[in-house]
Image: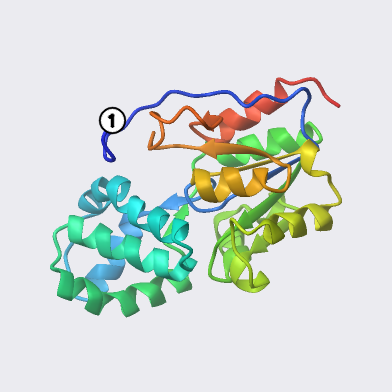
């Protein structure tokens, strides 16, 4: 079995009889990905020279800390802190220095989220989905500034609904956040797909309200786990959905 830090890419399938009415997506590590250059620049402002290459290489393993915090019921912020601590320690910084840097990194992140890199394939895929009549929305555990991020990275025009957990007072995998999205969009759970990057939070959270859940696994973190419909990108998922007959 692969270790936590091995990579692989094998897609699984999402079984649907027809094209969904709505596709709802997570934000971080689904639509937008960590920009190591942004983290490196923020550290440089604080007097620490850590290369973007080192940060990028550490991300795959560091992300486990965030996932575990969420599975334990901790807040998004607590998980974010754990991820950054692990990321910077793996990048070569001493634990005490990492703790001292966290407030500065939080401020930099809230000014312009570190998860800001949008693959070129994402807007093209969203446009294909909309042109085919699939309605689009976002449900994300975030810090309250997700719509501003989308405006800055050019994604805001694709979504009719953006639900940010910090503004809702409820976070995934609580069924309430999924139910709010369905109600506001006026779509049924059985004709909707939700996709994100953490199985227990995103896939199981969606399934709890009757939605079809899919995993976006860009780094191959869950290649060894065959329980989840798994796609390497939003573009791959959209292509699979559009290959289904229209309802």
Task: Give the vertical position of 176 relative to 214 (above or below).
Answer: below
Task: Give the vertical position of 59 relative to 167 (above or below).
Answer: above
On the image, the x and y values in percent for residue 93 come to 15, 65
On the image, the x and y values in percent for residue 180 come to 76, 60
Residue toward you, 185 or 41:
185
Q: Which residue is mark 1?
A: 2
Task: Give the vertical position of 21 relative to 69 (above or below).
Answer: above
Q: Please give left or right for residue 158 compared with residue 75 in the image.
A: right
Residue depicted at 59% across the width and 45% down the height: 204
How would you rate the neighbour count of disc 1 (Cα within 10 Å): few for under 14, some for 14-19, many for 20 or more? few
Asked whether residue 32 is in view, the answer is yes
Task: Give the vertical position of 221 relative to 187 (above or below).
Answer: above
Asked whether residue 148 is in view, the answer is no
On the image, the x and y values in percent for residue 4 come to 29, 40
Secondary element under disc 1, as helix, strand or loop, is loop
Quadrant (top left, top right, bottom left, bottom right) of the N terminus: top left
On the image, the x and y values in percent for residue 221 come to 38, 37
Quadrant (top left, top right, bottom left, bottom right) of the C terminus: top right
Q: Please give left or right for residue 98 compared with residue 12 in the image.
A: left
Residue depicted at 47% across the width and 48% down the height: 29
Residue depicted at 58% across the width and 32% down the height: 235
The figure's colour scheme reads rainbow
Q: Please give left or right for residue 146 compared with residue 98 in the image.
A: right
Residue toward you, 65 or 129:
65
Residue depicted at 30% across the width and 69% down the height: 42
Tally the numbered discs: 1
Q: Quadrant of the rendered structure where residue 177 is? A: bottom right
């Amino acid at each position: 079995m692969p270790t936590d830090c091995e990579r692989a890419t094998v897609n699984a399938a999402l079984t649907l009889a027809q094209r969904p009415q709505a596709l709802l997506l997570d934000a971080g590590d689904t639509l937008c990905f960590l920009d190591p250059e942004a983290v490196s620049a923020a550290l440089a402002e604080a007097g620490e020279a850590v290369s973007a290459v080192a940060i990028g290489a550490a991300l795959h393993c560091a992300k486990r800390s965030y996932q575990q915090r969420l599975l334990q019921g901790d807040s998004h912020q607590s998980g974010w802190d754990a991820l950054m601590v692990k990321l910077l320690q793996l990048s070569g910084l001493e634990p005490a220095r990492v703790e001292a840097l966290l407030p500065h990194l939080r401020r930099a992140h809230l000014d312009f989220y570190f998860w800001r890199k949008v693959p070129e394939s994402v807007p093209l895929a969203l446009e294909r989905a909309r042109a085919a009549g699939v309605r689009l929305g976002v449900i994300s555990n975030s810090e309250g500034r997700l719509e501003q991020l989308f405006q800055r990275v050019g994604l805001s025009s694709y979504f009719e609904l953006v639900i940010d957990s910090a503004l809702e007072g409820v976070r995934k995998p609580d069924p309430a956040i999924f139910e709010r999205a369905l109600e506001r969009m006026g779509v049924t759970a059985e004709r909707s797909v939700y996709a994100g990057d953490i199985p227990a939070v995103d896939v199981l959270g969606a399934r709890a309200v009757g939605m079809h859940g899919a995993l976006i696994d860009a780094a191959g973190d869950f290649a060894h786990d065959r329980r989840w419909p798994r796609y390497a990108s939003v573009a791959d998922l959209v292509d699979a959905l559009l290959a289904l007959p229209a309802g």
